[in-house]
Every structure is written in structure tokens, then in C-alpha cells.
Image (cartoon, helix red, strand yellow):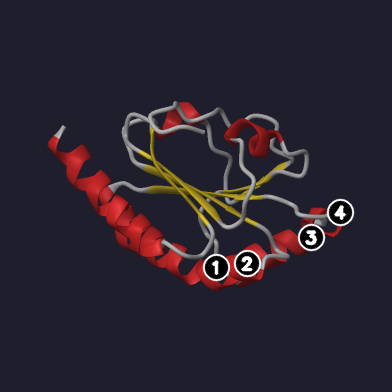
Amino acid sequence: MKLQEDMPEFSGVSQWVNGEVKKASLRGNPVLVHYWSISCHSCKETLPQLIEWRDRYKPKGLQVISIHKPRSDKDTNISAIKEAIQRYKLTHPVAIDNSYKLVDAYQNQYVPAYYLFGADLKLRHYQAGEKGLKMLEKRLDRVFHTDAAE
């Protein structure tokens, strides 16, 4: 995806955990879409940071949606994914994307990966990998400052 592109629809999800999300219901709030996989060590290491952001920015309107991207056939075990969601306290909506529909829509190649959308649902920032989380945090701060002024 390129900056300022519209957020894709959440169609073709294999299963939702913690509630299904429709794009139309997100308009008006910044949205952080987070890609992860149960077989990704870096993903597990960065989940506490994601949860901290979710809890810190939720009162300001941030919506967090995680998308589980399987990296192998073993990663498509829905029971194992649900156990990980519970273990890592992912209480926000999580899309299990075993058919890669969202992966294709977002043109995503990496986990962990973060797509930050403004309240207008246009892409403001993209970050892949575990490095650069401080830059993403600065972008979160900027989105809230900018969106509040608009």
C-alpha cells in the first residue's frame, strides 16, 4: 500500500475473534492495523508494545485491529491462534486470515507489520519489523494531534 491510499475492506476473513469489524464503522477514528503470526518470535516480543498503545490511545479513539497472517500450514490452526490471542491478551478484534484475502488487499509481506490510518481511513504510516517502533509511536502521536486539529 502507498501513503494516502484508502483502507481496504475486511472481506474474506476466515474467522473473527473479539468481534467482527466493518470498515464503515471505523470512519472518524484513527485505526492501527497490526499483522502478526503465532510462529513469529518478533511478533510475540512486540505484542506488549501494541497492547500498551492500544490501552493508552483507546480513550482518544484509536481502534486497533490485528490480522493473523499464517506463515506456514501449521499457522492455520484456529485453536492454536485463539489460544495465543488469549495468552497475549489481544482483547481487540483479531481477523484470522488463513485464505490471505487481507494479506493481498494490504499487499502485506511481513510480520510484524503496522498500518496506521487517520480518521479519514487513509494510510498515514507503514512500519514493518520490530525495529522502528519509536517512529510508529511518534506517528501515533502526530495522527492524534493532526486529527484533533482537523
Q: Is label 2 in a helix, a strand or a loop?
A: helix
To which residue does mark 1 refer? Answer: 89
- 3 or 4: mark nearer the eye: 4
To which residue does mark 4 refer? Answer: 73
Q: Is label 3 in a helix, a strand or a loop?
A: helix
Q: Earlier in the sequence, mark 3 or mark 4?
A: 4
| 102 up-or-down from 133: above or below | above
To which residue does mark 3 refer? Answer: 79
Q: Earlier in the sequence, mark 2 or mark 3?
A: 3
Tag 1 and tag 4, C-beta contact below 8 Å: no
Q: Which of marks 2 and 4 is nearer the N terminus?
A: 4
Image side of residue 77 versus residue 20, left or right: right
Q: Which amino acid does label 4 sit on?
A: Asp
Residue 59 visible to the viewer: no
Residue positioned 57% across, 57% down in the render: 112
Image side of residue 33 versus residue 27, left or right: right
Q: What residue type is labelled 1?
A: Lys
Tag 3 and tag 4, C-beta contact below 8 Å: no
Tag 2 and tag 3, C-beta contact below 8 Å: no
Which is more toward the observer, 97 or 61?
97
Label 3 vs label 4: CA separation? 13 Å
Q: Is label 4 in a helix, a strand or a loop?
A: helix
Label 1 vs label 4: CA separation? 24 Å
Q: Which of marks 1 and 3 is nearer the N terminus?
A: 3
Image side of residue 54 versus residue 89, left or right: left
The C terminus lies in quadrant: top left
To which residue does mark 2 refer? Answer: 86
Q: Which of marks 1 and 4 is nearer the N terminus?
A: 4
Label 2 vs label 4: CA separation? 21 Å
Checking the image for residue 76, the label placed there is none
Residue 129 visible to the viewer: yes
Residue 39 picture location, percent across and down: 73, 65
